[in-house]
Each structure stands twice: as C-alpha cells, then as structure tokens.
Amino acid sequence: MPLLDPDRLFPNDPATRKTARRLYEGIVDLPIISPHGHTDPRWFAENEPFPDPAQLFVTPDHYVFRMLCSQGVDLADLGVPRADGGRVETEGRTIWRLFASHYHLFRATPTRMWLDHAFETLFDLYKRLSAETADLYYDRISERLASDEYRPRALFERVGIEALSTTEGALDDLKWHRMIAESGWNGRVVTTYRPDTVIDPETPDFSGNIARFGELTGCDTTKWEGYLEAHRKRRAFFKQHGATASDHGHPNARTEDLPQAEAAALFARALLGDLTQEKADAFRGHMLTEMARMSLDDGLVMQIHAGSYRNHSPEVFSKFGRDRGFDIPQRTDYVRALKPLLDAVGMRSELTIILFTLDETVYSRELAPLAGVYPALRLGPPWWFFDSAEGMMRYRQIVTETAGIYNTVGFNDDTRAFCSIPARHDVARRVDCAWLAGLVGDGRVDMEEAEQMALDLTNTLVRKAYRL
Amino acid sequence: MPLLDPDRLFPNDPATRKTARRLYEGIVDLPIISPHGHTDPRWFAENEPFPDPAQLFVTPDHYVFRMLCSQGVDLADLGVPRADGGRVETEGRTIWRLFASHYHLFRATPTRMWLDHAFETLFDLYKRLSAETADLYYDRISERLASDEYRPRALFERVGIEALSTTEGALDDLKWHRMIAESGWNGRVVTTYRPDTVIDPETPDFSGNIARFGELTGCDTTKWEGYLEAHRKRRAFFKQHGATASDHGHPNARTEDLPQAEAAALFARALLGDLTQEKADAFRGHMLTEMARMSLDDGLVMQIHAGSYRNHSPEVFSKFGRDRGFDIPQRTDYVRALKPLLDAVGMRSELTIILFTLDETVYSRELAPLAGVYPALRLGPPWWFFDSAEGMMRYRQIVTETAGIYNTVGFNDDTRAFCSIPARHDVARRVDCAWLAGLVGDGRVDMEEAEQMALDLTNTLVRKAYRL
Amino acid sequence: MPLLDPDRLFPNDPATRKTARRLYEGIVDLPIISPHGHTDPRWFAENEPFPDPAQLFVTPDHYVFRMLCSQGVDLADLGVPRADGGRVETEGRTIWRLFASHYHLFRATPTRMWLDHAFETLFDLYKRLSAETADLYYDRISERLASDEYRPRALFERVGIEALSTTEGALDDLKWHRMIAESGWNGRVVTTYRPDTVIDPETPDFSGNIARFGELTGCDTTKWEGYLEAHRKRRAFFKQHGATASDHGHPNARTEDLPQAEAAALFARALLGDLTQEKADAFRGHMLTEMARMSLDDGLVMQIHAGSYRNHSPEVFSKFGRDRGFDIPQRTDYVRALKPLLDAVGMRSELTIILFTLDETVYSRELAPLAGVYPALRLGPPWWFFDSAEGMMRYRQIVTETAGIYNTVGFNDDTRAFCSIPARHDVARRVDCAWLAGLVGDGRVDMEEAEQMALDLTNTLVRKAYRL
C-alpha cells in the first residue's frame, strides 16, 4: 500500500470528491510559485548534494524536532546544533533511528503529510516509516542524495518550481543570489528584503548592525535621514537581486506614524540602547509605516508576519539558541494596531501590504473586514501552525464570505525544508479544490467559476500580489 | 442554467440533503417576519417606484461598494454620495457597468447569494452578471422597476412579508409610519426606538440633540429626571407607532448601574461636553441599565448591538461620511461588561434583552453560557459579517450545545437593501434546515423534533422574542 | 422508536459512517477509566440506593437546572437547596413533572444525549420524556432505584468502570475512601488532591482553613515552611487513598515563581486577610509552581482547570450558594501566564501537567503550540461547556495538527451525575471514531493506524497520563 492516497484531502461524499478531483486535475500540473520561504540560496548557488537523511529531514526542521521534544526526546540527541558548545549527536543513522521510532507522533499532522509526500514521490518509499523501516529509509535516501538527479537544481526543476523567493537579512551580501545569477542556470531564485535586525532596537547588537548598515550603503546611519537612505539603497540592492517584496517579523501588529522629529529622536536613543520596551515597540511600529512609504516609491510588496513570542523557554534558548520550536503565538489585535499605517497609506491601491497572523480569531473579526475594504491590504495564507489541511479549510470558510478570494494571495510554503515545498503546495491545492467542490456541491458557485477560482488561487493571485 | 440551485446550501451527502429539503419544504412558504432592519419607511408610505438599478443595488449597499473599494474602485465612481460635496458619478448605467465588471469579486460571498436571488426571483435574470450582461441586466431591471408590480408595497406583499420593523432615531417624527398607518394599506411596518444620538455623549451636537429631545417631549431635559422622563414619553410615542423593541448600538458591551446622583452628574457634564472618553463610556453603559428598567415598565424588548469600531478611515469619513463600509469589528468582552446590567435585571424573566456580537469568539466562551442561565437574556442571530451561510452554521454549532435553540430568537435580516430581505431569510432557513438535517442524520434529534425546531427557528421564536 | 440511534454521532456519508462504526466496535467494550470527576465517594462507601428520580437527575445537576432557569423556572421549584434557608420544592414527582414539561429545551444539547442514554440503557425507557410521559418515567426510575441492581456498586460494575477518581478538598478526612478500601469491594475508587481552599487567599475563612490544615498534619502552618510541609504530608495522605493526581481550579492561568522570602511574606499577609486581589492572584500563581515541584518529588500528576468566573449572579449566590450554573468562562491567556511555571519545570519530562481551558480560542493559538513542545505539558480534553459532540470535534480538528494526539490524555467525564458517566464516555468514543473515520476517508491515516489511535484515545493515553 502506498503512503499517499491519490484522493487524499478530498471530501468524503463521492459526488463532491469527484468534483474536487476534477478541479485538482485542472491545476495539478501548474508550476510552483513560492513567493515566501526560508530555503538556503547557497544550495542553488553551489549545487552540492544534500547531506545525509537526518540533516535533510530532521535536524533543520523545527516542526519535526519540536514534536519529539514534547515527548521527552533531547534535542541534542537529534543533532540540533547547540549554542553553548555542548555535545550533540552527529551520527546520521543514529539520529534517523530515533526519529523513525517516534514517527507515530506525527499521525494526522501536516508534518506527516509533507514527509510522506517526499518519501514516496522523491524516494519511492511505500512502507510507513517506523523503527522497523528506519534503515531501509536511511539507505534509500542516502543513495539517492548522492546522485546528480538529487542535487538542488535538479530537484528544483523536477518538482516544477517556476520561481522561489528566499529571505535574507538587510545586512546579507546576497553573494549566493549573485552566484546563481551569474551561473547561467535558468532557475528563478529571488531574495526578499528582511530588515528586522536593523529595525528592531531589541535585536542583539543593534547599534553594531546599524554601523554595518552604514558601511554597506555608504550612508551616515548615525543620523535618522541617513538611516532611511540606507534602507532605500539596500532595498534597491535587493531589487537588483530579484526581490519583489520586503518582509517584517514583529512580535505584534503595532504601527505608528510619528512626526519625523519624534521618530528621529527614538532612533537616536535606540542607537544608545536607551529605549524602554514600549518605546522600542513604537519605533518598530513607526518603521512599518516608513517601509510602506518606501514601497510606494520602489514597488516592493510588504509582508507583515506578526504575533510570535520568540524563544519562550530561556533554558532551551541558552542551550540551543533561536528557532528551536519554542516560538509560541500570542493574542494579536489589528484594528487599532494597524490604524496609523492605514491612515497613512491604506487607501493607496498601488501599494500591496500582505498581512499574516498566528491568532486565528482575528480572521473573521478583524482581518477579513479590513482587507475587505482597504485597497492596500491583502491577506496572506494561513501561516506556520495553520499551514495545514484543517487550518487552510478554516481560513477559506472564515475569510471568504467577508473578503472574497480576490483579497487573498494564494499560497506560501514558508519553509526551510526544501523537500516539503512540493508537498506543501500539493496540500494547499487539494484543500482549495476540496473547499471549492463543496461550494459547487451546494450551489454557491458553478463549475466554470470553480475552475477559474482554482486557477486564481494557485497561480493568478500569487503572481499579481507578489509581482512575480 | 439558472443562477439559483434549488438545493443550494443543503448538505452534499444525498440522504442528508433529502432530509434538509424535506424540512425546508415545511417552512418555505411561511411568511417573513423581519423584526430588525434598516429599510426606509418612506418607501411604504409614498409607494413611489424604486429608482434605477444602480441606486437600488449598488449605491446604498455597503456590502457591495466596500468590496469594490477593496480592489481599488473609487467610491465616487460608484455614485456613493460625498459628505464633502465632491463630484460623484450619477449616470446609473455607468455605475452599473463598473459594478458588473467586478461582479466576480463576490464569488462565494453572501452578497452574491442575495443579489442572484433578487436577480432571478424578482427580475427573471438567469445568466450571471458580468461586463457582457451588464446592459441586459440594467434594461430588464429598469423596465420592471417602472411597473406598478414593483412598487414597494407590491413587492412587500409579493415576497410574503408579514411584519417589518424599521429603526428610527429617538428624534425622528415617525411621519412615514403615521402615513402608512393612515393609508389604509394593511402591510405591517413598525418602528424601533433607537436612542443612540440622545444617549451617546460623543455624538456630534449631543447637547443640541438633548434640547430637541426636550422640545419633542415637553420635558426639562436639562435635568436628569426630565431626561429620563423624556425617554419614557418617547418610548410610548414609538410604541404608538408599532414599536415592540428598542435598539442600542454601542462600541462595546459595557454596562453600569450607577447611583442616581452619580448618573445625574455624568449627564450634567455630558451636556457641557465635558466628559472624558472613559466617562462617556460609563454614561452609555449606565443608560443601558436605565433602558432595561424602562423595558420592565413598558414591555419593549431591548436589543444590544455591540462591538463596531465605526469609520475606521478618517480619509473616507471626511470625504464620504459614515456607513461607508469602514466599520470594523473589534474584540468585545461580555462577562464583566454585562454584570452591572445583569445584577440589576438579569433574573427578571418578564424582560427580554437580545445580545448581538461582531466578535464570534465570545459565543462559546461568554454569550451562550450567559444566555443559557440568565432568564432575561436571549441571543440574537449572527450579525453583519456573520449573516452568511458559514457564519450561521458556526453559530448553530457553537451556541446550541450550551444555550439550546430556545434562548435564540430566529433570524434578523438587518438590511438597508429591500430586495435582499427575501434572499436573506431564504439563506437563513436553508442553513437552519441543513444544520437540522445533520442532527437528524447522526441521531441527535428525530425528524418530528427537527420539523418543530425548523418552525420554531423560522417563526415561533421570532414572534415570542419580539412580541410581534 | 428507541431514544438512541445506534449510529448516533457518526458521519452522514455512508462509507465514512461504516468506517466509524468499525472503529467504534473495536473500543466499545473497553472498560471506563474516569480519571477526573466529582461523584460522591459516599455512594460507593455506603452503597445505599439512590434517592428519587428528581434527586438523581435534576436537583444536583447544574447542566439541567441552569437551562430551566434560563427560561424562567425558579430554581426553588426544582428543589435546588437554598443557602438562605428559604423554602424549596421537596416533592420528587412535582419537580420531575416540571422538568419533564421543559425537556424540549435540551434538544441538540449534550445534556439531552446523556439523559436519553441513561433513560434507555439503565431504565429501558424508549419514549421521549415530556409532560405526557413524566409519570411513566418517574414510576419506572423509582421502581428500579429501589432494587439492589441499582445500588451504586452494582451500577459501577454494570456500566463497566475500571477506575474512578473523585475529587476531595485538602481538608477532607477521606473517610469514605477508607471505608471503600476496608469494605472488601474490589471497585477502584481513588481520590484527587484539590487544595484550592488552602491555597486561595480569597476563600472564605482562609486562615481558619490553614489552622485546620495545621491540625490535620501536625505542621506549623502559621509559617511558610510549615505550610509547605503540610501540603507534602497531605499529598502523601491522599496518595495513600489512591490519589495519582492533584487538581487546581483557578480563575486564570497565572503562575509565578517567586523568591521564597517573597512567597513567605505573601503567605503571612494572606493569613492576616491582608492581600489585595492582585497579590492574592500572585500567591495562587506561585503555589502552582510549588505544587509542580512537589509533583516532581511525589509523582502526582497536576491538573490546572483555569478560567471560570464563579457565581456571576450575586442574587443567585445569596439565595442558593455556589455551583448553581452561574459560573461563566472568561478570556484566559496562557502564553505569558504559564511562563514562570514552565521556566521552572516545563522541560522536565518526568512531570505531567495537564491543562484545561474554558476559552476555546487558546487551543490553536496557545495551548497546542505549548503542549507541542514542552515535555511536561499535556492537554486535557474539552471541558465543561465543551464536553459535547461539537466541542470535542472542534478540539480534535484544532489541536491535533500542532500537538498530535500523543500530547493529549483521553477523556474526562468531570461529572457529578453518576448516570451520565457511561453516556459521556460513549459520546467521547463516538466522536473520536467519527473524527478518525474522516481522516481515514480522506487518506490522512490508514485504517490500522486509526484503530491504534482509537485505542490510544480511549485507554492508553489516559492510563499513561494519569498513571492509573
């Protein structure tokens, strides 16, 4: 029995399932457009083989190791690198066996769906991963990874990626993107401008970052005007490397539109490390409005990813550092928080601001009503904990009636795990088709419309929103 | 192919669909009771033909123009009247074509369902509205509107309305209702007492309103006691014009039960325009309790519509004024907010207070538990952004297990768009039958009960709650 | 026609229903493990017949009398005991008839499902309860209750209970548990350590409770260290009477991990009745961390039931006292609230802390992400207002994708109503099978896995989490 049901995620009712299948057949072969994610451009620049199975599937994937951690597995035993220099397991097969023996934990989770998709479609594995099949998997995957057909560029083409956005910090030199561009390879890999470390006064060594920002741009970043100019220059540099968007990961959705003198004063104190938490928050909020104004000039689409309480466990943070699965969503309010930004630029239809949330309760109460009226706003797809079959279905059911589908922007995979890209896009396409099939089934849209909507959700809306 | 599927909104599973259809057949011919809405009584008083298609379907309907605005269409190009005297499009056909060319935006939204229902059932249009069919629609609708069968009273009767409540401010002279009563026409159109402009100290020209309130009632509204007496008189005047209910649109659900001296002092300062935002909020909250006490005397049912952040965009407000689609829900808490009111009158079973929310998260956490125990409380139907197939289904699934259906009050259409009344009631009946069919299908209620419940939801509960 | 549909709560789609039925058949005969509830151990100690039908089904069950109260029935007429000594109805048949005539209020509620289950499976009643059948029910139930087969121990065995936890306050002498243990009866009834009245400084007569706590344990509870020692001794005493868990009912989820001197100072002021509300809250929060530390030593599983606003109506509280259906959930945040506790003990995998909530919005946003990474955390089943078919289904759909099922702990009936125990476990098993059947149907898990998961949800996870 294969790992993947060909009708997976389609409705159980036979007639509705048939409709879903038909809709899916119309879009299954469309290329993947991945406008937001965190894969490593170095892969495509150097095109070296991926390392062993554990380093491909376990060690870098917080979805995987957080679940094992929750059941008492030590992150060090999974090979997760330590920030404190402590010992971690390095033997790939040992890590893989530990992972395999806990694979049942992922039953009914999206992670299981992504992994099974990769195992079957990329590695021709058809028997469920378990302690018993661990070595079979390890050997098969290792063998394939060593072949040229599994190098990054070959995989990129094999899974049908048309365009892939990575995300780089404002201080990144983008050398991998340059190397890709100069290589003659015709895969489209673009960057995204992520300036958090030069915007968030609470970032470690903020003033050092700002100094480096000045060096890179030749601007006097000790002054407010020079600092803004540095952003402008850096955005242009990112655009030269294909960027069509910026991205902003803030703990909440607060925005401000302060008088320039006040913003400049906050910046000056930020450089001195002299801002209260509340003032740092105000500064971050103000910078979102500055970024939006720059977007009006340079056309970069603006993405706001708000609401994560990062590094919740200080014990894990001190041992293993950041991005270790301990980022927990928190309640996020948007109606008042976004008002300064919207007052400034919300009515500008030439601007696109894409909003993401980790607090599902705001979709029907706040985000769909806001995106359903402000021309500058669009809603990003369900993010992170909600990048899942149930999460996506809830999103469509909750958002559409108020905002329609044309204020949404298609799918983002947002992944660090390369092999999960086709799997994630496949899940999104299936869920959209399942949702549309239900609407056809109960007469809310007709089949011709549903076919158009499936195409729009998969392709048209992504291209348009991200200008790709 | 017609616009309307005869089985629309029924479950996809064939047996459950059959049950839903059977339940629906038992109630489809029941007259419409519309106990809360915002249609214009003048229509029925004067019985003049409705103006052109754009003025009937586009210009006055914030559901319609907010969606077009969200995609960059200028409200002025849709003929939305400007508050600042600026130019707006006035040619009906031009507006209609613009609307028609954006009709795809409404796919899978309730607005589309309402419009298609009117287009097909009232205007015999069977081909989807689009740029191509815009003129066909415009001509057909214009032609029909000119005929006597499409005058307001004829339509009122044709769509089977038994009773219709409009909503008038406390300062309204109710002349249209008087005119209807004196006309000999036997359609039942009643008013509702909506005193927000003489209760909310933050209303523009509050003291002017209070002065006018005194003139209308002959009470000394410069004094607290005279002010309360004016309410009593005005409520009696509204009752003479058919009112069975009052309605209160507050930004939150705060209530207070202040000592009379304290309330009087707040009122005195309100007249001077001298209340902080917090004190104005307290005064509004206290007045809800005063209104409830008056309801105990005069029997008016009390409706509380809480939680909207009105006129979110100052730019749109200054250009176009209020009710332009920029009212955004915000988080609303009820458990502590309603306590003063409930402490005062919550155990009085002869009183009916109907609660509405724009924050769905409170249904299972707060409103169903409250309405499931306090004799004075009932839950209004899903309101505004939730007056939709998915919103209604979620409401039934979330509310019923804690509060049952007998603490709910049937459907409200709450509309300004006359043609949407039968469409909205039809959607509500279909969703209720779909929900009940599911309960019959999985053995939670039997068919006989479901038939009774369908009748109760459509008719009995509305009549009882609204005393209509 | 019977009251119970053999396929109740299974999916409507025929194929999926068949899968659900097959899964259910695999677990229907498993014994009931009830690890958390509020039945009276005296029943099993004395094994006296249950009193009349009204006292079995109406008078003690807040789910029942709150619904009747919401429709204007006076609690006194239902025989609910008064705290103020006022008269209440005492004639069982009169109460029963009043209840029966309102039975339609429970349509589509879990209460109706539980009652019908007991009526049919324990009392062979097959015609719906109503005013007409009230006497038939009363006579049948009365007759059966008088027979030996309906004494508590016989019922315990008949419905297949393997283990039942009750909940006793820290000051309870546990004499009924001792009596059960010494009786030679082999039913397993264990206690749970519930120290709220000696932890919450806002409890009436807190200092009296602490004095009594000292007498019972021989510790000097006027001092902080003696007070902690008293807890340790009392926990050991509860463990001797079978306890495997403690339980903590707090108004919110706040935790603290204060320096010992600061905690001791709060305790000293608590004894003097000299804590502000905020300090009382801090003290309760700190004690959760102390309890967790004691759990690390003695192995008791820790349950936190947070978020209820108790005794919302002062009128009802003064007439009837506590637990009268007027406990209303309120918004509860966990991410920051639990941080002190988690910083202290969250990474300890030998500890089990089970979290419950009355605020559903936190499942996807906070609780599943937290339980999906912290080794010490597990999620309790949907509680109280959510112990229902829809509530359970939402819980599985919202929690599983982030936390999996292996960070959950099976079902709790949490009931005071003995006859509802088998009914509630049956509902939980059916909903789990319905959910799993859907996952099988759309290819998310295979049948073999689903069978294992059904067994785990019903049995394995409960035993493991509660160490039963």
Image (cartoon, coloured by chain):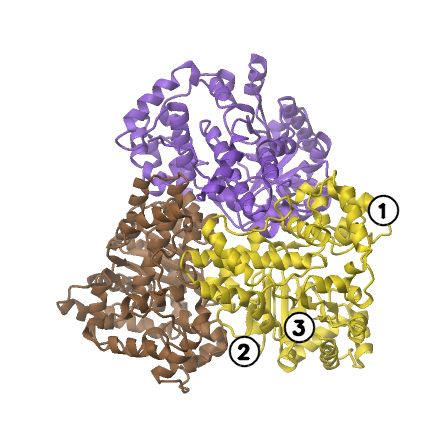
Chain colours: A brown, B purple, C yellow
B38 or A76: nearer the eye?
A76
| Chain of the residue displaying label 2 | C
x then y, percent, for residue B35: 57, 30
How far is mark 1 from mark 2, CA to CA?
Answer: 54 Å
Q: Can you say whether C436 is above or below A51 in the image?
A: above
Q: Which residue is mark 2?
A: C349
x then y, percent, for residue A79: 38, 81
Q: Quadrant of residue B248?
A: top right
Mark 1 vs mark 3, foreground winner is 1
Same chain for the residues at labels 1 and 3, yes or no?
A: yes
Q: Secondary structure at mark 3?
A: strand
B164 or C391: nearer the eye?
C391
C356 or A123: nearer the eye?
A123
How far is mark 3 from mark 2, CA to CA?
Answer: 16 Å
x then y, percent, for residue B261: 73, 42
Q: Which residue is mark 1?
A: C91
x then y, percent, for residue A449: 31, 41
Q: Can you say whether A101 is above or below B137 in the image?
A: below
Q: Tell me how many marks there are.
A: 3
Of callouts 1 and 3, the N-terminal one:
1
**Image mark for residue C245:** 3
Q: Amino acid under label 3? A: Ala
| Chain of the residue displaying label 3 | C
- Pointers 1 and 3 in contact (C-beta within 8 Å): no
Q: Secondary structure at mark 2?
A: loop
Q: Amino acid under label 2? A: Ser
Q: Residues within 10 Å of mark 3 (few under 14, many from 20)?
A: many
